[in-house]
Image (spheres, rainbow, N blue to C red):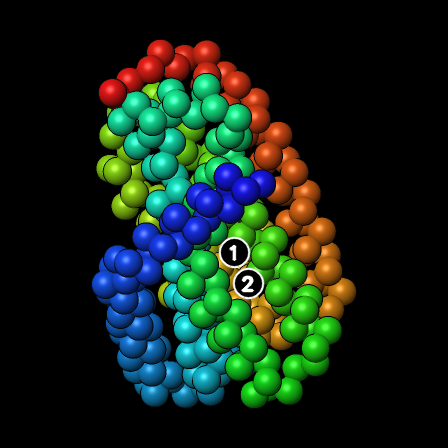
Amino acid sequence: MKKYFLTFMNRLMTTIVYRFDFVCGLALTAFNVMISVFVWNAIYKTSTIDSFRGYSFKDMVVYLVLTNISSMVFSFDICFRIGNMIRTGQFSTYLFRPINVLYDSFFDYLGRCFISILIFIGTVFIYDLYSGIGIFDFLLTLSYFFLCIFLWFQIASIISLLGFRVIQMWPLKPILRGVYMLFAGMYFPISFLPSGFSRIIAYNPFGMIGCNLSEVVMGKYIQSKVLTLNIYLVLCIIVLNLIYRVLYKKALKLYEGMGA
């Protein structure tokens, strides 16, 4: 366990040392929120109704803040880690050391996003304190958030296995980002989409860590539904982990070594 903790600390210290990158990412997130709020403010002002599908303008602002902050936690960087290690030759060294690549990648991911996780938890705590939400609901929301972290890591880990076949993974980033923005509800809740389409994608993995996470924080769901969603996340994590293990074993058979 100590070796994985060192991976976490090394990545965290790298994030702190190169804090200008983090600050720029935070500024970009704030800018995205401002643009989205400006657009929705214009929509609400030109509309004759005060809310869209249960969302007032105030609710929409909270939703946009939560989804954009959570997007800092669910980073795509982990998708390219294995590909980079294969290209540079580092992956070969992992095969001869008593290190589990999945666990090592998870602690690297935690170190990379640790500050963003604290910012999101702080935002949730302030919102719940302001809204008068009870401690049980707050803990239930945190459990959902941490399960979303595990879910996202499993999704990213499966995507990262493309590194065994694709030399350069970076061209996939805008494609993945576009899919995430659409299916996670980055700019508007998924329920705003046509009813038939929204029902189909409401519980996709991206929606669970985007739109649904924000609505859980905002208290849009009753406790029993949040508990059901938590169980659903656990099942998704188990299934994705099994898929990863099968694909990882197949990918190792293709690996011939690259880099140094």
The kind of residue tagged 2 is: Leu
Q: Residue at x 25, y 20 (%)?
A: 260
The quadrant holding residue 129 is bottom right
Q: Residue at x 56, y 54 (%)?
A: 148
Q: Mark 1 sits on what residue? A: 209
Q: CA distance from mark 1 to mark 2?
A: 5 Å
- In terms of secondary structure, where does tag 2 sit? helix
Determine whether label 1 and label 2 are within 8 Å by CB: yes
The kind of residue tagged 1 is: Ile
Q: Position of residue 164 (x, y in %)?
A: 37, 22
Q: Position of residue 244 (x, y in %)?
A: 54, 30
- Horizontal relation, residue 34 to residue 230: left or right: left
**With respect to residue 90, does 132 lie above or below?**
below
The quadrant holding residue 225 is bottom right
Is residue 71 visible to us here? no
- In terms of secondary structure, where does tag 1 sit? helix
Is residue 57 visible to us here? yes
Q: Which is more toward the observer, 219 or 113?
A: 113
Specify the label residue 107 is tagged with. Answer: none
**With respect to residue 83, does 254 lie above or below?**
above
Of all residues, the one furthest to the right in this rendering is 224
Q: Residue at x 56, y 88 (%)?
A: 130
Q: Position of residue 177 (x, y in %)?
A: 34, 49
**With respect to residue 103, does 243 lie above or below?**
above
Q: Position of residue 41 (x, y in %)?
A: 33, 83
- Horizontal relation, residue 19 to residue 138: left or right: left
Specify the label residue 213 is tagged with. Answer: 2
Residue neighbourhood size for the residue with mark 2, other residues' Cα within 10 Å, grouped as few (<14), some (14–19), many (≥20): many
- Point out the image quarter for the N terminus: top right
